[in-house]
Image (spheres, rainbow, N blue to C red):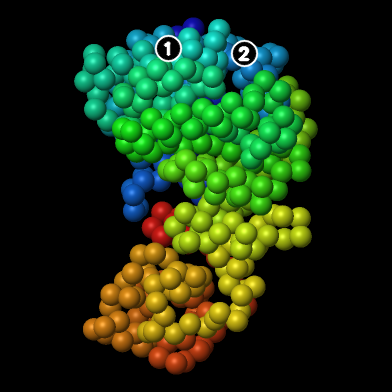
């Protein structure tokens, strides 16, 4: 099998390892560069990642996975020299900014991780590549091997897949939640001793029957607090043909988006998981972002006067993010905010914020039923992180 066919197959298979912003916001990917995925960087920066599997061969039999052991499909693998050459070819053409390398488990986790390590070693030592590398750590890999991968990578990650043992068992009998959790602790310990760009994990949303948004958010908050993770990524479940879950419903893209928004409120805005606006089933509302839903449930805290509210109060206002809140605080001593146009120039989304603020004592709310465009949601995701 030639390299181009392998690239198409293993690039397509890699889409289930999430490293970018939600599918809800993602433009249709290029059919020409199907292996390139956008990842949100600092501010408005987008990093184009060459996302690929070393191999799709896997000894695990996860119910949702297109690479599960019992599924009938063409098994392929890259040799380290072959894959590193293909990446450098794309990098030198200016098509990609970095590498995201994952893999199935062929023969054993150790052997498969060693093949991945060989690939990134060739990039660093033979091609003198100094750019970004994100390398997945496979379950059950020994600590010394993880350290070697960490030395050559900018970021490492290990997929937890579900919020607890019960839900993981519902989608994979081969994986053990406690073992995965211990693995993340090892990654966290290595990162703390030799900091790079942080460690991440992934949770699959919508595959485990009965798993609620509250379960997912509580686990994510625990991971941030106990292990100092840089990010938790949420991968909406997509049913794959010839798997036990092929007839299951896919995760609505909006659910994945709401989880990211709730995640940002916890990481960046000092919300607690318990105060988020879950419905009676324990899920986040789909018709509005959780910050707006929280504000509507806590109407006694609003409106706030934008010329007087402190930074933390401003952060709780829908439509005002960290950047716009900081600008408001900085400008007030010199120039009083007098109009919604002033507020807009400082970066606030006025059609959200006006229902929860007064400007110079005046309250001029907008009619209910906000219709937010996807463009606006994307802007907030990249700039303000909601």
Residue under the image location 51 percent in, 56 percent down = 266
In this view, the residue in front, 149 or 260, is 149
Dot 1: within a 10 Å radius of its alpha carbon, few (fewer than 14), some, or many (20 or more) residues? some
* Mark toward the start of the polypeptide (1 vs 2): 2
CA gap, disc 1 to disc 2? 16 Å
Image height of 220 relative to 159, above or below = below
The residue where tag 1 is placed is 115
Mark 1 near mark 2, Cβ–Cβ under 8 Å? no
Image location of residue 77, percent across then percent down: 49, 11
Residue under the image location 47 percent in, 40 percent down = 227
Q: Secondary structure at mark 2?
A: loop
Quarter assignment of residue 130 = top left
In this view, the residue in front, 362 or 304, is 304
Image location of residue 218, percent across then percent down: 61, 49
Q: Is residue 25 left or right of residue 58?
A: left
The residue where tag 2 is placed is 59
């Amino acid at each position: 099998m030639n390299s181009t066919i392998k690239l198409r197959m293993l690039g397509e298979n890699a889409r289930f390892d999430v490293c970018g912003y939600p599918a809800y916001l993602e433009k249709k990917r290029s059919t020409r560069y199907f292996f390139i995925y956008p990842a949100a960087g600092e501010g408005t920066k987008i990093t184009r990642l060459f996302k690929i599997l070393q191999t799709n061969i896997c000894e695990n039999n996860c119910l949702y996975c297109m690479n599960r052991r019992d599924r009938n499909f063409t098994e392929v693998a890259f040799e380290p020299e072959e894959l590193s050459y293909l990446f450098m070819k794309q990098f030198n053409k200016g098509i990609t900014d970095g590498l995201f390398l994952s893999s199935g488990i062929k023969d054993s986790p150790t052997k498969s991780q060693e093949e991945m390590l060989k690939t990134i070693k060739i990039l660093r030592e033979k091609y003198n590549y100094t750019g970004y590398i994100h390398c997945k750590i496979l379950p059950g890999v020994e600590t010394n091997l993880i350290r070697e991968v960490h030395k050559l990578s900018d970021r490492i990650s290990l997929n937890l897949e579900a919020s607890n043992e019960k839900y993981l068992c519902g989608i994979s009998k081969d994986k053990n939640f406690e073992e995965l959790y211990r693995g993340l602790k090892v990654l966290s310990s290595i990162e703390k001793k030799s900091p790079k760009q942080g460690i991440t994990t992934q949770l699959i949303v919508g595959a485990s029957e009965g798993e609620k948004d509250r379960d997912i958010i509580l686990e994510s908050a625990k991971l941030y607090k106990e292990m100092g993770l840089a990010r938790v990524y949420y991968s909406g479940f997509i049913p794959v043909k010839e798997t036990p879950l092929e007839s299951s419903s896919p995760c609505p893209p909006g659910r994945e988006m709401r989880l990211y928004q709730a995640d940002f409120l916890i990481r960046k805005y000092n919300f607690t998981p318990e105060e988020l606006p879950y419905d009676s089933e324990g899920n986040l509302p789909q018709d509005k972002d959780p910050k707006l839903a929280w504000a509507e449930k806590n109407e006694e805290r609003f409106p706030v006067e934008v010329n007087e509210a402190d930074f933390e109060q401003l952060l709780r206002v829908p439509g005002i993010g960290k950047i716009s809140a900081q600008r408001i605080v900085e400008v007030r001593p010199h120039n009083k905010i007098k109009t919604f146009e002033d507020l807009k120039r400082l970066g606030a989304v006025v059609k959200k914020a006006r229902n929860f603020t007064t400007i110079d004592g005046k309250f001029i709310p907008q009619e209910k039923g906000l219709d937010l465009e996807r463009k606006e949601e994307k802007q907030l995701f990249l700039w303000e992180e909601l």
